[in-house]
Amino acid sequence: MDGEALTKYNCCVTQAEALKKEYEKCYGMISEHSSQSPYPWQWICEPWPWEYEANFNLCREEGNTCGLTKKY
Amino acid sequence: MWTYEKILEYPVKIKNPNPEMAKIIITQYGGPDGELGASLRYLSQRFSMITPQAIATLNDIGTEELAHLEMVGAMVHQLLKNASIEEIEKAGAAPYYADHGRGVYPASAGGVPFDAFCLQSKGDPIVDLTENLAAEQKARATYEYLIDLADDPDVIEPLKFLREREVVHYQRFGEALRIVQDYLQEPHLYVMPKPGFMK
């Protein structure tokens, strides 16, 4: 068993959890079962992943709290 | 079971419609070496696979192929969505349009509907893993041909990502095959001490 790889894996899991939370704050729920929803129910509000309007370009701009911007 | 994540594995954002490209990229949705066949192949083979590593590899890659199916579907959808009838006709996509409009239907670039004959689940771990090595190489070659035919960076980038994943999957299946071969060669007769009355 490669202990170093396992440590890296666990580290990536922790990082991914935090990044998913940050993403959801800006763009809505990723999961229908494990994401929190603001009122009203958000799941069907944001564009679906296969639509052009989804797949936002990620970029950093001044005054943007998330560091992420929707760009169409 | 599965759960859905409302996000693509790699972003697809195609500005310009191109029915000609849609007509050929559809082959990685429902063609002979496409993602639908890949996911069904691996997810079906799991049931008779041996060794935890090889089973996990099929489970994991079979699941990822479903994410790739979604990406390819997204590409076809975005390439067709705002295409005019004139563009569709000019691209030779009128026969597709007649049957499917601007929808996404699993078929090959030549218009042959998806067929499970493009995959095998043989119940034999060596047969199945060897098939998968070939399948990953066939998919890699297909993505390279599609990249040859594409000129839009919005199309080329996701195709490059999908090609890379085929290379990674080929490596993983190679490891799984080695693990299964080693396991089959190990002696499975376990030695135990002879009881006194047999001496």
Image (cartoon, coloured by chain):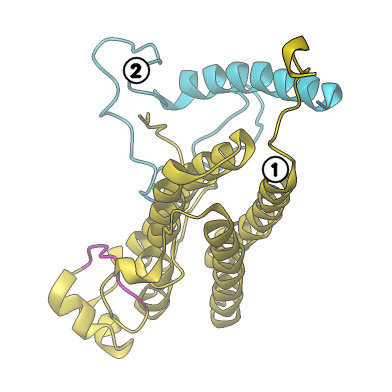
Chain colours: A cyan, B yellow
Main SS category, magenta section: loop
Mark 1, other Cα within 10 Å: few <14 / some 14–19 / many ≥20: few
Query: Do the residues bearing badges 2 and 1 touch, measured as CB atoms within 8 Å?
Result: no
* Residue at 35 percent of width and 66 percent of height: B30
The spot of residue B82 in percent (x, y) is: 29, 66
Chain assignment, label 2 = A
Tag 2: residue type?
His
* Quadrant of the image containing the N terminus of chain B: top left
* Quadrant of the image containing the C terminus of chain B: top right
Q: Which of A63 and B69 is in front in this view?
A: B69
* Residue at 40 percent of width and 15 percent of height: A34
Q: Which of marks 2 and 1 is in front?
A: 1
Relative height, residue B22 to residue B10 (above, below):
below
Q: Is residue A62 left or right of residue B103?
A: right
Q: What stretch is highlighted in magenta?
A: B102-108
Mark 2, other Cα within 10 Å: few <14 / some 14–19 / many ≥20: few
Tag 1: residue type?
Tyr
Q: Which of B96 and B108 is in front in this view?
A: B108
Q: Is residue A65 visible?
A: no
Q: Name the residue under label 2.
A: A33
Q: Is B107 within the magenta?
A: yes
